[in-house]
């Protein structure tokens, strides 16, 4: 609970609005929910550059599933993150595809 309170205060500083994130419980109840083994994968396993990794970490994104949720809402959601631009987005998508978490340009997740 204390971590959630800190995130509530730090998100505006990181440049991400609260609407960017939806609670995980709501997302997992949907038909096309991301499987838990994919959702819970730490972003450290993506081998991202330091800049991209730090931007995501500062925003509170620590799992692959959180990124996939944001990508499903649109690229603008990711681009709203401070110090996260087009090149960072391209790198992130490339790494997600390379690891099999992202299937195609539309942002659909791979079924594992």
Image (cartoon, rainbow, N blue to C red):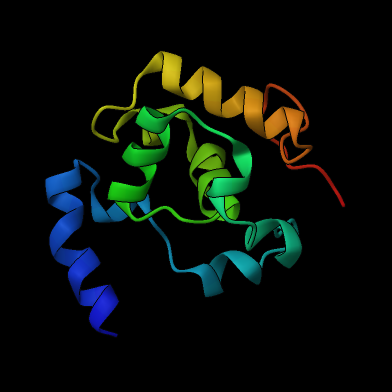
Image-quadrant location for residue 10: bottom left
Query: Is the residue 20 above or below the residue 102 in the image?
Result: below
Q: Position of residue 45 (x, y in %)?
A: 63, 46
- The answer to whether residue 39 is left or right of residue 8 is right
Q: Residue furthest top?
A: 87
Write the residue at 70% across / 60% down: 33
Q: Nearer the viewer, residue 17 or 96?
A: 96
Q: Nearer the viewer, residue 84 or 68?
A: 84
Query: Is the residue 38 above or below the residue 29 in the image?
Result: above
Q: Position of residue 38 (x, y in %)?
A: 71, 56
Write the residue at 75% across / 25% down: 104
Q: Is residue 76 visible?
A: yes
Q: Nearer the viewer, residue 41 or 72?
A: 41
Query: Is the residue 43 above or below the residue 76 in the image?
Result: below
Q: Position of residue 53 (x, y in %)?
A: 42, 38
Write the residue at 60% across / 26% down: 93
- The answer to whether residue 25 is left or right of residue 100 is left
Q: Nearer the viewer, residue 96 or 77?
A: 96
Image-quadrant location for residue 95: top right
Q: Position of residue 69 (x, y in %)?
A: 54, 49
Task: Please identify the quadrant where the N terminus is shown.
Answer: bottom left
Q: Is residue 35 visible?
A: no
- The answer to whether residue 25 is left or right of residue 21 is right
């Amino acid at each position: 609970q204390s971590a959630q309170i800190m995130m509530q205060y730090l998100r505006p500083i990181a440049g991400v609005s609260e609407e960017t994130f939806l609670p995980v419980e709501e997302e997992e109840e949907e038909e096309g929910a991301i499987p838990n083994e994919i959702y819970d994968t730490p972003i450290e396993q993506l081998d991202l550059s330091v800049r991209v990794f730090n931007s995501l970490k500062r925003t509170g994104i620590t799992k692959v599933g959180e990124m996939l949720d944001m990508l499903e809402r649109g690229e603008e959601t990711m681009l709203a993150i401070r110090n996260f631009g087009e090149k960072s987005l391209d790198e992130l998508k490339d790494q997600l595809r390379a690891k099999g978490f992202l299937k195609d340009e539309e942002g659909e997740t791979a079924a594992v």
